Image (spheres, rainbow, N blue to C red):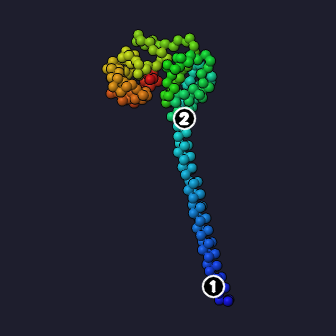
Amino acid sequence: MDHKFKWIDGVLVLGMIMMIAGLVIAKKEKNEDKIEIIKKPTTILKIGDSLVDSKVMIDIEGEVLKPGVYSMDSGLRVIDVLAVAGGLSLEADREWVEKNINKAEMVREGMKIYIVKKGEVIKEQLGGQVKSGGIVSLNNATKEELDTLPGIGPSIAERIMEYRAKNGGFRNIEEIKMVSGIGDKLYLKIMDKIGL
């Protein structure tokens, strides 16, 4: 009888040792999972931090509720700048805004946005041609209007018009660098004077 109980006691002890070993292994695996979960968000936060540090200065004036110079994340769009500036005032010429402001345009360093008042006329005389808002439209300007841009002569103006006809217009202003004869240096001279 005692022999039988010793054998059962041995099996019980062995079973308890196996159960404790299983718990230790399970706990270790669970802790490793926790460590992995903690590591992943840290990496994501580091990537996010580097993106947040990329800022540009934008000047928005005219008929917005809070005109001024704003530091914005690069990669945002004009519509985001309008929102930060409190949106359009009651006096803003909404029809003009719809026709002349590309709200989907990406913001860039030193960008100036001016919102006109109802009845306000903003025209700039350039080489006999009149352009609204002081910006030459890459998708609509005549050869003469393009020729008024610094560093753009008649031949490059012709190439801009050929490129726009062949490619269905420009999707963003940086695309002008795809035109033969326009590199980074010339682009920097004209980037604040061109729009879509």
Locate the N terminus by quadrant. Answer: bottom right
- The answer to whether the residues at label 1 and label 2 have Cβ atoms under 8 Å apart is no
Q: Of tags 1 and 2, which is closer to the observer?
A: 1
Compare residues 158 and 36 and report the one nearer the observer. Answer: 36
Please identify the quarter of the rendering in which residue 179 is found. Answer: top left
Amino acid under disc 2: Asp
Residue type, numbered disc 1: Trp
Element marked by disc 1: helix
Task: Report the residue marked by disc 1.
Answer: 7
- Residue appearing at x 53%, y 19% in the figure: 97
Instruction: Please indicate whether residue 38 sits to the left or right of residue 170 in the image.
Output: right
User: Can the viewer see residue 1?
Assistant: yes
Q: In which quadrant of the rendered view does residue 80 lie? A: top right
- Return the mark for residue 31: none
Residue closer to the observer: 24 or 137: 24
* Local secondary structure at mark 2: strand
Could you classify mark 1 by the number of other residues whose Cα lies within 10 Å: few (under 14), some (14-19), or many (20 or more)?
few
| Dot 2 crowding, Cα within 10 Å, few <14, some 14–19, many 20+ | some
> Does residue 69 show up?
no
The residue under label 2 is: 73
